[in-house]
Image (cartoon, grey):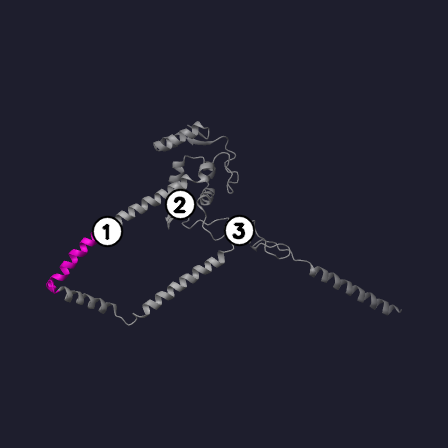
């Protein structure tokens, strides 16, 4: 074999080897960095949590589970709103040629004509006003009573939520009355349920279930955790909550309360603080 042919053979062999190496690299699964977006494994398959829900990684690197029915539920709500709008438009279609002002005038005239059989037309408006006044007063009284009952019921539901709160009962180191007075303002009763709102006025959403409003206890953890004085609110042992992050672990055996603050408390708050002091959870200092 000539030197020229040998050199050509070597060149072909090198090119073939390079192509095989490139093909081998291309056939390997591409690893995903999982910095933002749906969490996937090395093969590009969606990773799921213990309940079988896909996991989404936010721009802050935190993972959130998305329940399987989230998209279908939102689509269902949109379809329901669209149908209600279409039904309303169909009902209004039959009245498109009616002049509201003329219709009201005609109804008033007919009413007076019917009543003229009993009283003179000049007295009709006076009689109607007296009757309306009596009914309006009764309706206003009933509305006032109902509003009072609804307010009392909402207050009772919110009070029950605080009383049954595991977070408040196990992780909070300040008197319950003080805690409820401070954090009760972050909840509004909507459709009979306490809905959490943050200091910015927006609803508090769950860090565990994407797109869902936080539960009562999770909302308390989030709101307390965002405060600069959270270490003074939580118990010294830091509790065991998912968001406590050992808060309060470096404060010794309990929370310190200045005597000047203690003297400003209501009698109920002073009594509760004294009980905590007796348990060693609070220390009153001068």
Q: Is residue 270 magenta?
A: no
Task: Mark 3 vs mark 1: give the one in front.
Answer: 1
The residue carrying pointer 2 sits among few (fewer than 14), some (14 to 19) or many (20 or more) residues within 10 Å by Cα, namely many
Residue at image position (87%, 68%) is: 3
Task: Mark 1 vs mark 2: give the one in front.
Answer: 1
**Which SS does the magenta portion mostly show?**
helix
Residue picked out by circle 2: 186
**On the image, which quarter does residue 18 sit in?**
bottom right
The residue carrying pointer 1 sits among few (fewer than 14), some (14 to 19) or many (20 or more) residues within 10 Å by Cα, namely few
The mark that comes first in sequence, 2 or 3, is: 3
Disc assigned to residue 64: 3
Residue at image position (37%, 41%) is: 159
The residue carrying pointer 3 sits among few (fewer than 14), some (14 to 19) or many (20 or more) residues within 10 Å by Cα, namely many
Residue at image position (45%, 37%) is: 169
Q: Is residue 131 magenta?
A: yes
Residue picked out by circle 1: 140
**What kind of element bears circle 2?**
helix
Task: Mark 2 vs mark 3: give the one in front.
Answer: 3
Residue 265: % across, % down:
36, 33
Question: What are the residue bounds of the magenta stretch?
Answer: 116-137
- Give the camera-side residue of 280 and 168: 168
The mark that comes first in sequence, 1 or 2, is: 1
**What kind of element bears circle 3?**
strand
């Amino acid at each position: 074999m000539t030197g020229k042919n040998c050199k050509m053979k070597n060149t072909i062999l090198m090119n073939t080897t390079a192509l095989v190496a490139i093909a081998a690299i291309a056939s390997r699964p591409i690893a995903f960095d999982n910095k933002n977006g749906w969490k996937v494994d090395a093969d590009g398959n969606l990773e799921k949590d213990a309940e079988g829900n896909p996991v989404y990684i936010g721009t802050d690197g935190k993972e959130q589970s998305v329940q399987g029915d989230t998209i279908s539920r939102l689509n269902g709500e949109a379809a329901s709103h669209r149908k209600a709008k279409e039904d309303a438009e169909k009902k209004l279609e039959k009245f498109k040629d009616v002049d509201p002002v003329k219709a009201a005038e005609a109804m008033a005239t007919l009413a007076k004509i019917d009543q003229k059989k009993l009283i003179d037309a000049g007295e009709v408006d006076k009689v109607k006003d007296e009757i309306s006044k009596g009914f309006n007063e009764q309706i206003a009284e009933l509305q006032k009573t109902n509003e009072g009952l609804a307010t009392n019921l909402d207050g009772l539901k919110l009070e029950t939520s605080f009383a049954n709160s595991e977070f408040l009962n196990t992780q909070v180191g300040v008197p319950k009355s003080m805690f409820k007075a401070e954090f009760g303002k972050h909840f509004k009763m909507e459709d009979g349920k306490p809905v959490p709102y943050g200091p910015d006025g927006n609803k508090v959403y769950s860090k565990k279930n994407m797109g869902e409003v936080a539960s009562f206890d999770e909302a308390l953890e989030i709101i307390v955790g965002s405060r600069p004085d959270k270490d003074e609110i939580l118990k010294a042992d830091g509790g065991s909550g998912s968001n406590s992050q050992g808060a309060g672990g470096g404060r010794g055996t309990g929370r310190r309360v200045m005597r000047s603050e203690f003297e400003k408390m209501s009698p109920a708050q002073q009594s509760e603080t004294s009980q905590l002091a007796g348990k060693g959870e609070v220390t009153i200092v001068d």
